Image: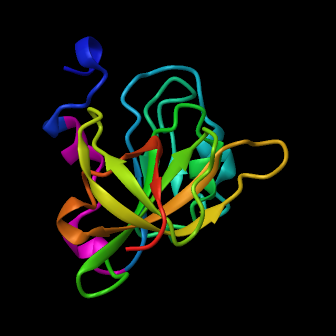
Amino acid sequence: MLISTGIPAKEDLERVRPSAERLAKGPAAMVECFQEIPCNPCVAACARKAISMAGGINALPEVDFEKCTGCSICITRCPGLAIFVIDQNYSADFALVKIPFEYTPVPREGQYVQGLSRSGEELGWFRVNKVTSGGGRNMTNVIALETPKELSMEVRGIKVGGYRDGE
């Protein structure tokens, strides 16, 4: 499915998803990288050594969820925009989903944005909790969205320009 549509299959996602027990402990990175290409900026970015590529630079990255703190540095370093951080402990009803974003205009904290699934399906309006710049040399922003917990494993993008202020 990935090769023909660009959308990972459910089985692919299950292999990289943190367990429910791990998600209950706090934020964790989910690396949705499924192509064996020479790339490893995520490995170099992780100070805790939570991301590794045991088979070398062409291997798929693997996350050691016991080491991962969900700091989000890896999100800004991934050229494939394939890393997300999920925090299901954000509140009783909402998760915090951190996604990479490289477009303009950049949404502002407090705005609501149209969240999209991996296939581009509109999933609803979600409040922007925080916007973090990747820095002057890295134009990847990290957008933290407050999503219903049941959508935290589905929201993976924002409709560019699909922003509004207030409730």
Residue 37 appearing in the image:
yes
Q: Position of residue 95 (x, y in %)?
A: 32, 72
Front residue of this view, candidates 95 and 44: 95
Residue 64 appearing in the image:
no
User: Is residue 17 a member of the stretch shown in magenta?
Assistant: yes
- Give the quarter of the image for residue 57: top right
Q: Position of residue 70 (x, y in %)?
A: 50, 67
Is 30 located above or below residue 88 in the figure? above
Quarter of the image containing the N terminus? Answer: top left
111 left or right of 4 in image? right
Is 143 located above or below residue 5 in the figure? below
Which SS type dominates the magenta stretch?
A: helix
Where does the magenta region start and end? 12-25
User: Is residue 132 a member of the stretch shown in magenta?
Assistant: no
- Give the quarter of the image for residue 19: bottom left
148 left or right of 78 in image? left
Work out which residue is located at the far bottom of the displayed protein and give it. 92
Quarter of the image containing the C terminus? Answer: bottom left
Q: Residue at x 39, y 78 (%)?
A: 26
